Image: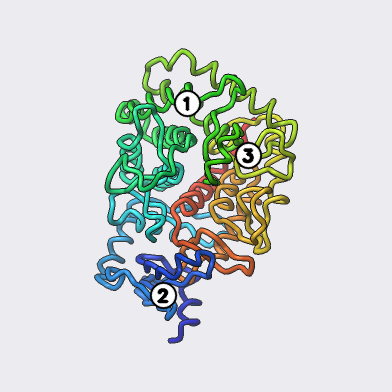
């Protein structure tokens, strides 16, 4: 059977079980179309080998024990649940869940991607993965990630941009602290606790009490009293350091800080102990400053920029990350695709992002998360777009080029996790907060 027929057979319902590590040559051209080599399972459960001459370096384990790996994967899936959303190819969710499982196969915690530059643990990616795991009934994987974060967090309650998966607390480079990681970690912990059986919630908080206390302290001490916003720090754009020395806080960091404060209040309530005395006031003050500073110009990336500079950060003020209906947020969020859409139909991280024609799947998936509550029809549209732009093996790539081809690393944990959260929110019939 030719490659084209194999790809056609696999795209509808294939499940990615193993994957190739791409050639070093591919890393020098990250935006080149992605080619993969590995094992997939078709809709009848048969193992199918798929190959491409352009994949020049293959993980030797990818061809070993395929039948055993397939059984293990199917048992793992059966132990939980998979979102089933009307109008969306279910293999999108099944493949995303298996991708998360695959990305934790060697380290005990889910890494961002399998290629060398991504085989690390990012706190923000991990928080969304925690939500995805616990929503699909895989609590052990969610707890492993939170335990890793608790072990990696420094005494100040801060996180480096990313960590070596086998060495908690060890960063692979000098990217430095990203303040939003603290808010993400608290939101992820709250997701775990909210979805625990009522009788187990207090015990779950106590298990991660160090993470809760340190993170809350970091958020309270991380507010610039001059601006009322978090001190400047790199966020999910991960741009170079000089930009952060100008004192320009981003909406994304402010929104995640607010979500972290709200999560902390919930978690202390579950624990039965009083939160730090300053928490409620700090949360309310930050909420007010966000509305006053970002609201008048349409919630752009930075204070003083116009509506065309809106970015994904506005989504972090909406459920399931935020749970508020702040003045003007929903309208700004609805306008965002007009500034962020790229030629292939996906979204860039923001309206002021470089015009290189690339769509970023994490942006699309996280926008779909917010849409699941704010506009379910839009959520289905964006999930459908993601389903249509997977690799031949059904994996979600990091990027999609101008001509619609998948590019860069695949699978990508952040995208896969956000897809699962969006699907679960649609299944629950989420009602927007009032």
- Compared with 250, 363 (above or below) is below
Please give left or right for residue 101 compared with residue 338 in the image: left
Mark toward the start of the polypeptide (2 vs 3): 2
Q: Nearer the viewer, mark 2 or mark 3?
A: 2
Give the SS element for disc 1: helix
- Compared with 102, 302 (above or below) is above
Between 170 and 273, the one lying in front of the other is 170
Work out which quarter of the rendered image holds the N terminus and state it: bottom left
Between 155 and 394, the one lying in front of the other is 155
- Compared with 193, 390 (above or below) is below
* Residue that label 1 marks: 219
* Residue that label 3 marks: 314
* Residue that label 2 marks: 55
Task: Tell me the residue at 45%/65% (across/down).
Answer: 27
Q: Nearer the viewer, mark 1 or mark 3?
A: 1
Give the Cα separation between the discs numbered 2 and 3: 38 Å
Give the SS element for disc 3: helix
Residue 122 % position (x, y): 42, 45
Mark toward the start of the polypeptide (1 vs 3): 1
Mark toward the start of the polypeptide (2 vs 1): 2
Residue 266 % position (x, y): 46, 25
Please give left or right for residue 204 compared with residue 429 in the image: left
Between 109 and 253, the one lying in front of the other is 253
Task: Tell me the residue at 52%/42% (across/down).
Answer: 241
Give the Cα separation between the discs numbered 1 and 3: 19 Å
Q: Which residue in the rendered view is the most extreme toward the top?
A: 277
Please say whether residue 322 is visible from this viewpoint: no
Residue 2 % position (x, y): 45, 86
């Amino acid at each position: 059977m030719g490659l084209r027929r194999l790809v056609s057979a696999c795209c509808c319902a294939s499940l990615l079980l193993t994957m190739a590590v791409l050639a070093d040559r591919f890393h020098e051209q990250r935006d080149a179309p992605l080619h993969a080599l590995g094992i997939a399972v078709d809709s009848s459960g048969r193992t199918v080998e798929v190959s491409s001459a352009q994949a020049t370096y293959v993980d030797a384990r990818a061809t070993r024990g395929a039948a055993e790996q397939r059984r293990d994967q199917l048992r793992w899936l059966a132990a939980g649940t998979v979102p089933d959303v009307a109008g969306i190819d279910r293999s999108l969710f099944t493949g995303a869940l298996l991708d998360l499982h695959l990305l934790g196969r060697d380290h005990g915690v889910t890494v961002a991607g399998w290629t060398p530059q991504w085989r690390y643990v990012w706190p923000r990616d991990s928080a969304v993965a925690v939500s995805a795991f616990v929503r699909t009934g895989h609590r052990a994987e969610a707890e492993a990630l939170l335990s890793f974060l608790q072990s990696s967090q420094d005494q100040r309650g801060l996180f480096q941009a990313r960590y070596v998966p086998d060495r908690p607390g060890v960063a692979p480079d000098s990217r430095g602290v990203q303040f939003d990681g603290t808010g993400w970690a608290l939101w992820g912990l709250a997701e775990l606790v909210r979805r625990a059986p009522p009788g187990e919630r207090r015990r779950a908080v106590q298990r991660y009490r160090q993470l809760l206390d340190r993170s809350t302290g970091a958020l309270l001490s991380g507010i610039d009293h001059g601006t009322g916003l978090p001190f400047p720090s790199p966020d999910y754009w991960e741009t170079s350091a000089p930009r952060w020395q100008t004192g320009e806080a981003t909406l994304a960091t402010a929104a995640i800080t607010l979500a972290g404060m709200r999560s902390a209040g919930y978690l202390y309530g579950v624990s039965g102990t009083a939160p730090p005395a300053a928490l409620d006031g700090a949360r309310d003050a930050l909420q007010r400053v966000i509305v006053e500073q970002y609201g008048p110009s349409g919630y752009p990336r930075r204070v003083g920029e116009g509506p065309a500079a809106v970015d994904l950060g506005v989504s972090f003020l909406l459920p399931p990350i935020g749970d508020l209906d702040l003045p003007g947020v929903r309208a700004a969020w609805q306008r965002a695709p007009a500034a962020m859409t790229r030629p292939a139909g996906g979204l860039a991280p923001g309206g002021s992002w470089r015009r290189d024609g690339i769509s970023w799947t994490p942006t699309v998936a996280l926008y779909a998360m917010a849409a699941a509550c704010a506009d379910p029809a839009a959520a289905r549209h964006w999930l459908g777009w993601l389903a249509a732009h997977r690799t031949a093996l059904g994996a979600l790539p990091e990027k999609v080029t101008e001509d619609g081809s998948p590019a860069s690393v695949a699978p990508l944990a952040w995208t896969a996790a956000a897809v699962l959260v969006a699907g679960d929110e649609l299944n629950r019939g989420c009602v927007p907060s009032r």
